[in-house]
Image: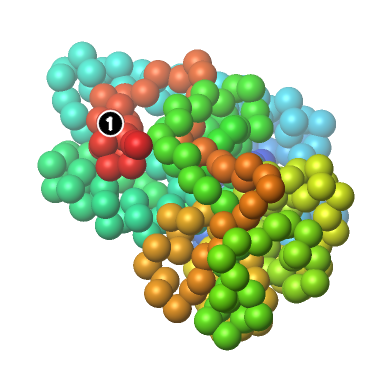
Amino acid sequence: MELRHLRYFVRAAELLHFTRAANTLGVSQPTLSLHIQQLEKEVGSPLFDRTGGQFRHVRLTQAGERLVTYAQESLRAVERGKQDIADLNGLLCGTVTLGLNNIFVARVMSQCIPDFAAAHEGVDLVLRMGPQDELEAAIIAGTMDLAFAWLPPESREIEAAPLFTDELVVVTGESHALASAQTIALRELEAFPLALPGAASNIRRLFNAACAQQKVSLRVSLEIDDTAARLSFVEAGRAATIAPRRAVVNHPRLRTIPIVQTNVQLSAGLLTHRSAHLSSAARRLADALRTAFAG
């Protein structure tokens, strides 16, 4: 049994989709399938129910559900061993995997990563973008060191360190009927179609909770998690949306409208596994992110 088999199996178990798992691992789907088949042969049992086909969503079998816990523990143990040896030798090296909510990608790439990479040439960085649930699953599985995402995390296995708080605002294009509004109440949004992030996102959950508290019903014409794509759609005048104020700073053709009569704020921060040992390189990256974004 090779570590590669376990890594491929854990990633497929996280996403429950062979093609998506292969893409994130940088291998072809047939290669991923072959390694998982080899692992299944070694353990003597199917690990996935492939009824829907390997190119669609799969499910873990009972054997797969049991093995994934041991595989995650094994991968974490190997990483801890590598990190301990590197720390023992006083080396700032190795690979650090950072997860990012897509809304933070541009800012992290411009405000943190170039300086960090230049100052730590011995550290290899892997940046992985995804929704909140995938980032948390990867941290729990031991395939990701830390993530920069919205708080709070869903899992109790995840520890959160807040970096900053932002205000959720309504965003429109210049030609939208609400563009000239100075403030807006949630109930006023009932008359307009909205483009919103998916229901599983922290932003959407916070917004839905605020609307439910005031018994406000929304007209959601488009759901899309990609913030840049959603803002482009709004800029074209197709709908209004909601977004953290900081996400709209570099969009001069968009209008931001503060929401009144409710407190709609959210916090962002670093997510790590409560029981995981961060390498020196991962701790140094966390420090760099705190320096760039705290406050």
Closer-to-camera residue (123/13)? 123
Q: Quadrant of residue 153?
A: top right
Q: Quadrant of residue 240?
A: bottom right
Label 1 crowding class (10 Å Cα cut-off): few <14, some 14-19, many 20+? few
Q: Quadrant of the C terminus?
A: top left
Query: Does 104 appear above or below 160?
Result: below
Q: How is the image coloured?
A: rainbow
> Which of 33 and 109 lies nearest the eye of the viewer?
109
Q: Is residue 75 left or right of residue 71?
A: left
- Helix, strand or loop for disc 1: helix
Q: Residue at x 50, y 27 (%)?
A: 160
Residue at figure coordinates x 68%, y 69% from the top left: 195
Above or below, 273 relative to 37: above
Where does residue 129 sit, x and y in percent of width and height? Answer: 49, 53
Q: Residue at x 73, y 34 (%)?
A: 64
Left or right placement of residue 207 versus residue 287 in this view: right
User: Residue 45: which quarter of the image?
Assistant: top right
Q: Which residue is mark 1?
A: 287
**Vertical side of 62 occupied by 87: above or below:** above
Q: Position of residue 126 (x, y in %)?
A: 36, 47
Residue 112 makes an appearance in the image = yes
Residue 38 vs residue 142: left or right?
Answer: right
Depth check: give the residue in front, 165 or 38.
Answer: 165
Say which amino acid is labelled 1: Asp
